[in-house]
Image: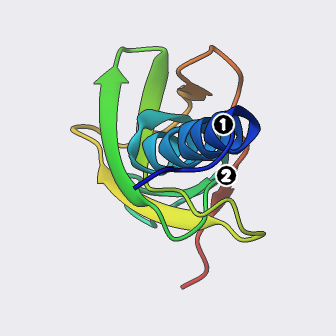
Amino acid sequence: MSLGTGMDTRMHRVVLIFVMLALASCSAAGAARVMDASVSSDGRELMLSVDSCNADLSAEVAESPSQVVVTVTVRNDTSDDCADVIVVTLDEPLGERQLLNVTGAVVPVRTASP
């Protein structure tokens, strides 16, 4: 069975490549931007608002006496207009420590409502 002319075959290849790239980007994991955070009353839980939509999230936290660095990894982001939330638990209360994302940017923190 013939696929048609050379032009048709090239067009099929181009479409196939775009479909493969689209599928790959849907399942690829990457760092997500943490937009802001709210801290629990005891200071140990952070609810992180993430610039992703309906994605699978995982988080890593690195704590020091002066700062907390959060890295959120996102997979299967739909790129719709919404935000995801992930909760992380700190070993010690956040207190006066600065909250940073993986790029070193300061993440705004607010106290959670009771």
Q: Which amino acid does label 1 sit on?
A: Val
**Mark 2 touches mark 1? (CB < 8 Å):** no
SS at circle 1:
helix
Q: Where is residue 88 in the image (x, y as percent from the top left)?
A: 33, 52
Front residue of this view, candidates 82 and 40: 82
**Residue 45 in view (yes/no):** no
Q: Which amino acid does label 2 sit on?
A: Asp
Q: Quadrant of the N terminus?
A: bottom left
Report how far apart the C-alphas of labels 2 and 1 lie in the structure: 31 Å
Compared to 18, does 89 lie above or below? below
Front residue of this view, candidates 50 and 66: 50
**Residue 97 in view (yes/no):** yes
Q: How is the image coloured?
A: rainbow
For image coordinates 68% across by 33% down, the residue present is 6
For image coordinates 47% across by 50% down, the residue present is 23
SS at circle 2:
loop
Q: Quadrant of the C terminus?
A: bottom right
For image coordinates 48% across by 50% down, the residue present is 2
Q: Which of label 2 and label 1 is nearer to you?
A: 1
Q: Which mark is residue 1?
A: none
Compared to 75, does 110 lie above or below? below
Q: Residues within 10 Å of mark 1 (few under 14, many from 20)?
A: few
- Farthest residue toward the bottom? 114
Of callouts 2 and 1, which one flags the residue occurring earlier in the amino acid sequence? Answer: 1
Q: Where is residue 70 in the image (x, y as percent from the top left)?
A: 45, 31
- Farthest residue toward the left? 91
For image coordinates 67% across by 52% down, the residue present is 51
Say which residue label 2 marks.
51
Compared to 30, does 34 lie above or below? below
Q: Residue 14 carries which label?
A: 1
